[in-house]
Image (cartoon, rainbow, N blue to C red):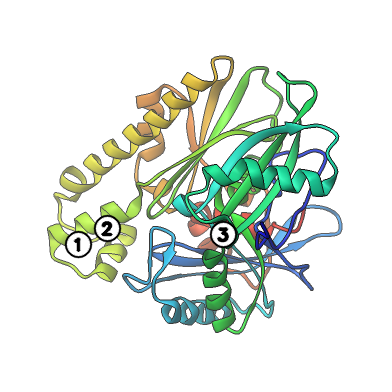
């Protein structure tokens, strides 16, 4: 069967930046990492400095009209294209090459085991055969990529293969909205992989702790991504459909506000005195319950790994007192990732504004790094 597969990239060893990309065209210059969520679009441009490290050379954030994107599905292409156009102008970037992500139920992310010694063509055929029964969509309309993780520790004559796949229409939709903004789509990444790629920007160099790991928890508008990182490798990841959108909807209904006004009030304050008790605390309680569940599921599958720290990112991570409440409830130190520790900021970028938005920029940062590894 002839799968509509755009790129296959095989690497011998994969660390944190699981480099299976569903779509890749070599970039001419830098990449604009563009995070398209259900509530906003975030843009980052990074410059790789000759002496090492990265510099933020452009960034911008703008809200999306209500209903333009829902649960990772682009519903109103023109609204998203117009928002991207305005965002690029706002950022001052002259780069036209873009990296975006797919996530959620539209993405299959799995690990399979295949015999060692297969030729590239044999391996491609074997991957397609093994993965087809797992797909919730038709293989002939699928974009697929895979990477070799290494030897299977329990079957020494086999290799572990990381496979990602999504419907071709998800790629085409993102291509259309990017082209509608006058830009060129160069990379379609997987959201959890891009977040993993940005991990070093969150925590920098860490000393090895035998048997211990960090959980990177990205809390966005409609999804919690829970990834466990050990020795700079993602050893576990899962997604939960819960996020800041729920709190915005509750504010909108309770205080009879428009979607835009509810989102603005959530970020900047100005709500009634009962907001913390009636809205914020119950939301944080639910959020912590979701994270606790993800933690327990991880421990049930990995008895030998202990999580020693929770590193929070995403726009919701900045909720007043969340890190402290999470640490208290789960008895694990929790902190908000501080990207300014490990990035330099160009003079053309408002450092204070970027510092304020930093926790929400992790996916965009990871996307901007998509061709740096």
* Mark earlier in primary sequence (1, 3): 3
Mark 1 touches mark 2? (CB < 8 Å):
yes
Residue 292 picture location, percent across and down = 38, 29
Q: Residue drawn 56% across and 82% down?
A: 181
How many numbered discs, if any? 3
- The x and y percentages for residue 68 are 37, 72
The residue carrying pointer 2 sits among few (fewer than 14), some (14 to 19) or many (20 or more) residues within 10 Å by Cα, namely: many
Q: Are marks 2 and 3 in contact (CB under 8 Å)?
A: no
Q: Nearer the viewer, residue 160 or 211?
A: 160
In x, y percent, where is residue 287?
A: 33, 39
Of residue 233 and residue 141, the one placed in the foreground of this image is 141
Viewer can see residue 200: no
Give the mark, 2 or 3, whose residue is nearer the N terminus: 3
Which residue lies at the image location 48% right of the left edge and 67% below the top edge?
Answer: 41
Label 2 sits on residue: 248
Alpha-carbon distance for marks 1 and 3? 28 Å
Tell me the residue that label 3 is attached to.
101
Horizontally, is 36 left or right of 94 in the view? left
Q: Is 41 placed above or below 250 here? A: below
Q: Which secondary structure, mark 2?
A: helix
In the figure, 156 relative to 251: above or below?
above
At a point 22% along the width and 40% down the height, the residue shown is: 282
Q: Residues within 10 Å of mark 3 (few under 14, many from 20)?
A: many
Q: CA distance from mark 1 to mark 2?
A: 6 Å
**Dot 1, crowdedness within 10 Å: few (<14), some or many (≥20)?**
some
Residue that mark 1 sits on: 252
Q: Of discs 1 and 3, which sits in the foreground? A: 3
Q: Assign a secondary structure to mark 3.
A: strand
- In the image, 296 versus 90, the foreground residue is 296
Report the Cα–Cα distance between label 2 and label 3.
23 Å
Horizontally, is 344 left or right of 120 in the view? Answer: left
């Amino acid at each position: 069967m002839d799968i509509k597969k755009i790129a296959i990239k095989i690497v011998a060893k994969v660390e944190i930046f699981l480099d299976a990309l569903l779509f890749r065209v070599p970039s001419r210059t830098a990449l604009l990492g563009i995070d398209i969520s259900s509530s906003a679009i975030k843009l980052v441009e990074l410059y790789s400095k000759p002496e090492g490290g990265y510099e933020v050379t452009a960034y911008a954030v703008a809200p999306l009209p209500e209903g333009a994107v829902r649960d990772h599905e682009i519903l109103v292409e023109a609204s998203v294209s117009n928002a991207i156009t305005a965002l690029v102008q706002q950022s001052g970037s002259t780069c036209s090459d873009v990296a975006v992500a797919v996530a959620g139920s539209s993405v299959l992310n799995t690990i399979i085991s295949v015999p060692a010694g297969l030729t590239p063509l044999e391996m491609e055929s074997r991957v397609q055969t093994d993965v087809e029964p797992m797909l919730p969509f038709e293989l002939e309309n699928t974009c697929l990529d895979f990477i070799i993780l290494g030897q299977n520790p329990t079957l020494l004559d086999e290799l572990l293969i990381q496979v990602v796949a999504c419907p071709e229409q998800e790629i085409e939709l993102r291509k259309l909205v990017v082209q509608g903004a006058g830009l060129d789509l160069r990379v379609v990444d997987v959201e959890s992989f891009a977040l993993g790629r940005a991990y070093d920007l969150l925590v920098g160099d860490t000393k090895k702790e035998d048997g211990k790991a960090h959980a990177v928890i990205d809390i966005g508008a409609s999804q919690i991504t829970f990834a466990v990182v050990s020795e700079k490798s993602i050893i576990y990841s899962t997604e939960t459909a819960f996020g800041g959108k729920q709190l915005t909807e509750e504010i909108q209904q309770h205080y009879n506000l428009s979607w835009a006004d509810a989102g603005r009030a959530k970020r900047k304050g100005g709500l009634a005195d009962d907001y913390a008790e009636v809205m914020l605390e119950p939301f944080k309680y639910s959020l912590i319950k979701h994270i606790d569940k993800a933690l327990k599921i991880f421990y049930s599958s990995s008895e030998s790994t202990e999580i020693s720290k929770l590193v929070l990112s995403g726009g919701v991570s900045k909720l007043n007192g969340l890190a402290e409440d999470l640490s208290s409830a789960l008895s694990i130190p929790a902190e908000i990732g501080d990207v300014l520790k490990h990035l330099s900021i160009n003079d053309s970028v408002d450092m204070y504004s970027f510092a304020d938005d930093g926790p929400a920029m992790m996916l965009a940062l990871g996307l901007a790094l998509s061709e740096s590894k």
